[in-house]
Image (cartoon, rainbow, N blue to C red):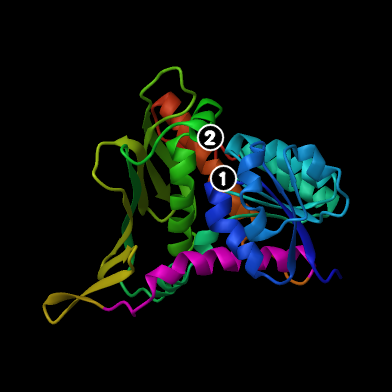
Amino acid sequence: MANKLRLAVVGCGARAQTAHLPFIKKNSRIHIAALCDRDEAKAAAMKDRYKPEKIVTTYNEILSDSSIDAVVITTPTYLHHPMTLAALDYGKHVFVEIPMALDETQAREMIGKAKTKKCILAAAHDGHFRPDAILMRQLMERKEVGELTYAKTGWLRSAQKWSLTGTRMETLTKGGGAFMTLGTPLIDLALFVLGEPDPCAVSGMAFKRDAKLDAEDLAVAQIRFGDGTILVMEVSWILHEPRDVLYLNVYGKKGAALFNPLEIHKEMFNRLVNVAPAINKKSCYPTSYQGQINAFAAAALGENKFPVPLEDSLLLNKISDAFYRSVKERKEVSLRASSGKK
């Protein structure tokens, strides 16, 4: 069993700089062997802070380095599939952002390759490691708000703050619009908080400002579960709002649970009372980012299984496929019919 995991970070953009590198550095079991980005100046700017052994501009330099045990892939979604397959072919463990792939077929190929190569493949479900999300799930399991009736979630980005240039525009033109970019982590968080109910059907609508783009700027989806409850999601980055709006609201027969910040409202003494315990909101993101990279390192070093199964990642791609099919066909799409299982 190796004492340290020699790891390379591929893609040194905002996500790598905020959600990965600071927490990789804090894990004493990880050694940063390389930073890889086609923009050499971007990667070089982080050299003093993270002290990688080397800075490279091509992925092949990572693949051909037999001393590198694992890669963290934080590139645009359309690159997840080819980069993951290549790393697995070279016997490297992979930690990749969600959505894991552009569609279910790609995701299944990635999972199959990991099993064949006997390598760890894990996806960044950071919401599963958030203290407030874990607490909200526990409260839902205890039925603090009664039986679930309805849930809704949304991420509405202000057009003033969300510039569509560079990598974001590249993503839009090569697959990965508002639904995949903003909606996937929301749905993942909602499913986790709700106790991972069984989704059976999806209906959706989408809007794109430019017909030449391959992906949408606004998406609305309804996910129906086997027990008759529903989750409604809305995401966009083109709304003319003064500030961003991010929410997850869950409604039960006896109350409501609100996320970000966590509140549990129940009717007591003829009025609504917030019974949620106090939690440090500022620590939630750092705790989740640290928790997921620690878990990946432990899995790659052969110490523990990664706690989030790949079936959770695959389900997100199934939902995404069903959403886009629903938009195209203008009807509800059964997840069971679109699962692709034999």
The answer to whether residue 275 is left or right of residue 330 is left
Task: Name the residue that disc number 1 marks.
Answer: 13
Q: Residue at x 25, y 69 (%)?
A: 255
Task: Name the residue that disc number 2 marks.
Answer: 167
SS of the residue at dot 1? Answer: loop
For residue 205, which numbered disc appears in the image? Answer: none
Q: Quadrant of the C terminus?
A: top right
Picture coordinates of residue 318 (x, y %)? 55, 42
In this view, 207 is above or below 47: above
Q: Amino acid at mark 1?
A: Gly
Of 118 and 39, nearer the camera is 39
Examine the structure image and report whether residue 290 is included in the region drawn in magenta.
Answer: yes
Q: Residue at x 65, y 65 (%)?
A: 25
Query: Label 2 crowding class (10 Å Cα cut-off): few <14, some 14-19, many 20+?
Result: few
* Residues in magenta, as a range: 275-302
Q: Residue furthest top?
A: 212
Q: Can residue 248 be seen here? A: yes
Picture coordinates of residue 180 (x, y %)? 49, 40
